[in-house]
Amino acid sequence: MREYLKFYIDGRWTDAARPQTFEVVNPATEQVAGTVALGSPADVDKAVAAARRAFPAWSASSREERLELLEKILDVYQRRMGDLGAALTEEIGAPAALANGFQVNLGLGHLTTAIEALRAFVFEEQRGASLIVKEPIGVCGLITPWNWPISLIAVKVFPALATGCTMVLKPSEQSPFNGQIFAEILDEAGVPPGVFNLVQGDGPGVGRVLSGHPDVDMVSFTGSTRAGIDIATNAAPGVKRVTQELGGKSPNIVLDDTDLAGNVAKGVATMMMNSGQTCSAPSRMLVPAARMAEAAEAARAATEQVTVGDPNGDFVIGPVVSKAQFDKVQGLIRKGIDEGATLVTGGPGRPAGLGTGFYVKPTVFADVKNDMTIAREEIFGPVLTIIGYDSIDHAVEIANDTEYGLAGFVAGTDPDRARAVARRIRAGNVAINDAFDFHAPFGGYRKSGNGREWGEFGFHDYLEVKAILGYEPQQD
């Protein structure tokens, strides 16, 4: 049983201002896995004040000093990866192979990428008679979700540190263990007091207060579109910068070629990973209408290889994160059946033999119309919808017919054809044949958010741009 009742503020572990706690439930067992303190406005005030005090010195630190700190963090992070993975399995039910593999390695990748980007980043450049200077924006409020906890903490904290900002982090109360271990890592690495602060809590008690705090200069939020709107509304009176990575209903256009079955199977694997709880998951698979039956059979065969069970065992996926998430997914599966989509495999209820835990059957719907609820709403569970298209123009039209625009996917053997289709998808990140790149910018169009994270592009939102005019270069 874990018990985390202190926050990390101004370089010290500090008692919460009031004795309020939250029980974290292990979604595989439905038993309490630990208790975490819930912060209040007083805790936010204390953390923001510490970050504000630390900002003058840290913002003036050199590139070399920041690199030295990030390298120290890298050393400690690598030693604590096992602890992070174990915590992930407990708090969100991620299978051990995923938790100790891709989940934790994403955080590591964001750290090494930030180090690479910082080494080469241009903070000052001469343009004619003007000097263009990029300076740290100030105190940052960082609010992260539960589905990829350590990755989404890393992708905010490391760019903030690299650019000279100070910060207050609020992880999701549903996955607070990783945030606590992350704070221990930064403390051991010697982050200067006040530069990084951690306050655990929920949206109303901490997130809303942090986003609206007058001494916070920038808010970076990842989560649902609904919560993102609330964050932006709270931040608006302060005219502070708000960057958001929100929901998605990403299309996966499977081109009409010889390896349709193989491309469908790859799309299923990507969709089902992390129990489908990924904002960029390719949840709308678009296939040639004339080959719908072939695609549905390939999806059925691939999905029935996705084993579900105890995250500590040898299974592909574990449970979804909570009873609320389980109920939402079940409701949307029933909605798909009611609206006339063809249930290919899976369906309502838990998988056979799993009476305890928030387990969902990996589910595939075929013959889906893009106006159905399951094609419009973000399900955030292991549920794939397959939609038919008549031509490439029709496929692109369907792909772009969404209020979201976080990601897109194109699968096919002809690279020129795949590239041409990828260019037409209105989304911030489009992967051809599941390509992956830590240095590529990540973020969305429309209701999927604004701003970009990952690599060098992740630095820009933490920087102000200053033009110093009349700054002619010195003549030798």
Image (tube, helix red, strand yellow):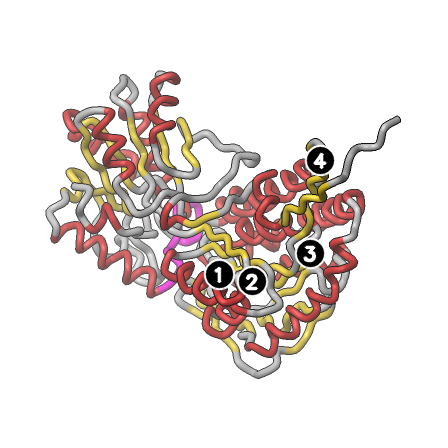
What residue is shown with label 4?
125
Residue at mark 4 to residue at mark 2: CA–CA distance: 42 Å
Q: Residues within 10 Å of mark 1 (few under 14, many from 20)?
A: many
What residue is shown with label 3?
185
Give the image location of residue 88, x and y in percent. 51, 55
Give the image location of residue 262, x and y in percent. 32, 25
Nearer to us of marks 3 and 4 is 4
Task: Characterize the magenta stretch by its predominant secondary structure.
Answer: loop
Residue at mark 2 to residue at mark 1: CA–CA distance: 7 Å
Marks 1 and 4 close (CB-CB < 8 Å) = no
What residue is shown with label 2?
177
472 vs 200, nearest the viewer: 472
Nearer to us of marks 4 and 2 is 4
Magenta span = 310-322
Mark closer to the chain start, 1 or 3 = 1
Amino acid residing under circle 3: Ile
